[in-house]
């Protein structure tokens, strides 16, 4: 698989798996009060400030078959997780957590509390309130979370290199391929790949901005 | 249209997050005004009745169904209570149109019948022509009508109104008062209205429960509580201005009250001890003497005063008079044309009569921080 399609595949699976997780954590952070909430928030937003190589190092060590957790995982899956596409997905989920959680948390927090309470006294169950009242009101946050996660995964480099290595067709993503091309002085290939990444990222952010403006205008 | 004949009894006690020691009763078809200053706990009580807030201990019973009882313990969720709640800021679902907002509260109605019944509720609240509009296209008054239709569509066992008129302008408020007064004639459920507007209370309520710092100070029929508050503190919280200290004596047949430098004979009040009392004089019991025909009749309780303030309020003139004998202030309103005809002017002399029916004596409240009036 070419680096471009591999990156798209990684971004797709990360987005599909992470957006529901981001919604769940974002909703908990927006509505619930509990001991240790500040610690949970700090943990979720840690990837924003931590160098990707540091995160990559910890993931590499913990997934290694030489330790208890990685060994158990390897015997469960039949093969070590490191240097595989699944390892890339797992590391992408962790690295992109803040990009999925923050928009969702803000979107849920923006829903007026009395609107949710009105749903409850109207007879809607908590699940019906979530599906019929909350989700339609935070669609922009969901779109934003999905777009940011997708775009950020496409550009992932440090963690991907540490956990996945550079195996052609398996873990060589677009950003690693760009790095390889530059190392090999193949500036033409690097240029094409960087331009495609640049345009895609720009388009993604444009979509989010337009949706945001439309949502603001409709209020 | 509404579940028949429930009545509501509420006993709530808690220390945190705000102190509550509230007791109230409301019969079917009765509108109880829950009033008190800001921060007194009115909305918390309403939320507790709706099941949105769980108090430390207490019981809530509607009709014969217990909604909360800490002895069992039992706590029904808002979904299980069948409550209609109208929020201060409407709380409409912004992504639904008017019709869908009402239908959302009809989960108990078979799906096929929902649209037809929702249109009936909208017709009742004069919103049937706007059923396809989104809430953001509606005025404040229209939004509150939709909120009321949604609350009624739940076919509630109790209707709760949380300062429903505070977010709309005065003209709309007057219209909504009339509409609510009409709609409530068709309702056979207890209705609790949270408000701090005493005019609203007097126009809409049958009964009144006054709470302050989370505690019930007095409750009962609206006109009784308004005219016969238990203490001067309650009278002040109800918005009364003409409060004085007087001397009460009871000769066994009648009560005699010395206040504002005159003696007023009132019906004997066995609960009052002879001595210092607090005195409330209702503005409606103050009658202005005609300038061209002064009266000095003994039964009219005449009081000589000087006008110290005269403020035009619409068709009325709000007057503050300084009583010659005691230098205390007396406030009341007269029609502007009456004031003009009698040449009422600041620093002018004016004699008024105090009708004894509008004079109410209360025991001095030792805990009242403003005991000296």
Image (cartoon, rainbow, N blue to C red):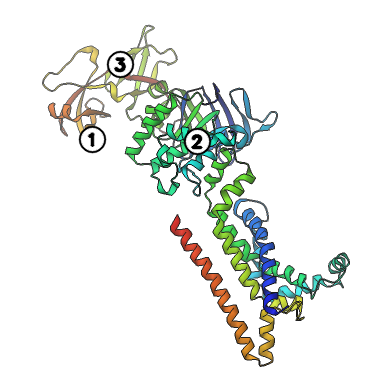
- Of residue A206 and residue B13, the one placed in the foreground of this image is A206
- The answer to whether marks 3 and 2 sit on the same chain is yes
Q: Secondary structure at mark 1?
A: loop
Chain letter belonging to callout 3: B
Q: Which residue occupies 67% across, 88% down?
A: A181
Please identify the quarter of the rendering in which residue B370 is found: top left
Instruction: Tell me which label, 1 or 2, sits earlier in the chain.
Output: 2
Q: Callout 3: 10 Å neighbours few (<14), some, many (20+)? A: some
Chain letter belonging to callout 1: B
In the picture, measured across the screen, residue B370 lies left or right of residue A3, that is left
Name the residue that disc number 3 marks: B356
- The answer to whether marks 1 and 2 sit on the same chain is yes
Please identify the quarter of the rendering in which residue B67 is found: top right
- The CA span between labels 3 and 1 is 28 Å
Of all residues, the one furthest to the front in this rendering is B112
Circle 1 or circle 2, nearest the eye: 2
Q: Residue B118 got which mark?
A: 2
Q: Answer yes or no: is residue B232 visible.
A: no
Residue A197 sits above or below residue A29 on the image: below
Q: Answer yes or no: is residue B60 visible.
A: yes
Of all residues, the one furthest to the bottom in this rendering is A185
Q: Secondary structure at mark 2?
A: helix
Horizontal and vertical percent for residue A157? 68, 78
Instruction: Tell me which label, 3 or 2, sits earlier in the chain.
Output: 2
In the picture, measured across the screen, residue B179 lies left or right of residue B316, that is right
Circle 3 or circle 2, nearest the eye: 2
Q: Which residue occupies 59% across, 62% down?
A: A102
Q: Callout 1: 10 Å neighbours few (<14), some, many (20+)? A: few
Residue B11 sits above or below residue A198 on the image: above
Q: Quadrant of the C terminus of chain B?
A: top left
Q: Residue B314 got which mark?
A: 1
Chain letter belonging to callout 2: B
């Amino acid at each position: 698989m070419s680096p471009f399609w591999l990156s798209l595949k990684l971004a797709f699976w990360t987005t599909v798996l992470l957006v529901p997780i981001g919604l769940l954590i974002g909703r908990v952070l927006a509505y619930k009060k509990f001991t240790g909430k500040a610690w949970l928030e700090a943990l979720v937003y840690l990837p924003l400030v931590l160098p990707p190589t540091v995160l990559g190092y910890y993931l590499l060590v913990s997934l290694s078959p030489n330790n208890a957790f990685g060994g158990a995982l390897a015997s469960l899956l039949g093969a070590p997780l490191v240097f595989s596409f699944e390892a890339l997905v797992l590391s992408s989920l962790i690295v992109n957590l803040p990009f999925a959680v923050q928009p969702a948390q803000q979107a849920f927090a923006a829903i007026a509390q009395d609107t949710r309470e009105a749903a409850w006294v109207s007879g809607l169950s908590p699940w019906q309130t979530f599906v019929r009242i909350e989700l339609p009101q935070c669609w922009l946050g969901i779109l934003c979370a999905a777009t940011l996660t997708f775009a950020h995964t496409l550009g992932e480099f440090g963690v991907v290199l540490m956990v996945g290595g550079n195996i052609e067709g398996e873990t060589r993503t677009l950003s690693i391929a760009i790095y390889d091309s530059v190392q090999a002085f193949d500036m033409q290939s690097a240029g094409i790949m960087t331009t495609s990444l640049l345009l895609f990222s720009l388009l993604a952010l444009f979509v989010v901005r337009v949706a945001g403006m439309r949502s603001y205008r409709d209020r | 249209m509404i579940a028949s004949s429930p009545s509501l009894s509420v006993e709530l006690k808690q220390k945190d997050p705000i102190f509550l020691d509230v007791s109230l009763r409301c019969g079917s078809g009765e509108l109880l005004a829950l009033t008190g200053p800001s921060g007194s706990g009115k909305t918390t009580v309403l939320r507790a009745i709706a099941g949105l807030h769980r108090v430390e201990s207490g019981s809530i019973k509607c009709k014969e169904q217990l909604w909360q009882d800490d002895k069992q313990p039992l706590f029904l969720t808002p979904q299980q209570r069948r409550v209609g709640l109208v929020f201060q800021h409407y709380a409409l679902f912004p992504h639904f149109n008017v019709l869908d907002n009402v239908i959302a509260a009809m989960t108990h109605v078979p799906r096929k019948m929902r649209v037809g019944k929702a249109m009936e509720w909208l017709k009742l609240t004069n919103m049937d022509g706007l059923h396809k509009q989104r809430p953001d296209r509606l005025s404040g008054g229209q939004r509150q009508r939709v909120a009321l239709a949604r609350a009624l569509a739940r076919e509630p066992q109790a209707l709760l109104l949380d300062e429903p008129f505070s977010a709309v302008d005065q003209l709309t408020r007057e219209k909504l008062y009339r509409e609510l007064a009409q709609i409530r004639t068709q309702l056979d459920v207890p209705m609790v209205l949270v408000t701090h507007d005493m005019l609203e209370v007097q126009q809409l309520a049958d009964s009144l429960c006054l709470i302050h710092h989370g505690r019930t100070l007095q409750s009962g029929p609206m006109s009784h509580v308004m005219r016969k508050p238990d203490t001067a503190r309650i009278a002040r919280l109800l918005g009364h201005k003409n409060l004085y200290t007087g001397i009460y004596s009871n000769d066994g047949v009648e009560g005699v009250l010395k206040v504002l430098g005159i003696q007023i004979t009132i019906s004997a009040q066995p609960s009052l001890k002879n001595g210092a009392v607090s005195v409330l004089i209702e503005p409606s019991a103050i009658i202005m003497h005609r300038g061209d025909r002064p009266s000095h009749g003994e039964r009219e309780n005449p009081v000589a005063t000087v006008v110290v303030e005269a403020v035009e309020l619409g068709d009325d003139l709000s007057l503050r008079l300084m009583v010659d004998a005691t230098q205390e202030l007396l406030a009341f309103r007269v029609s502007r044309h009456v004031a003009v005809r009698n040449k009422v002017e600041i620093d002018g002399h004016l004699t008024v009569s105090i009708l004894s029916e509008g004079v109410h004596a209360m025991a001095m409240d030792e805990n009242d921080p403003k005991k000296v009036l």
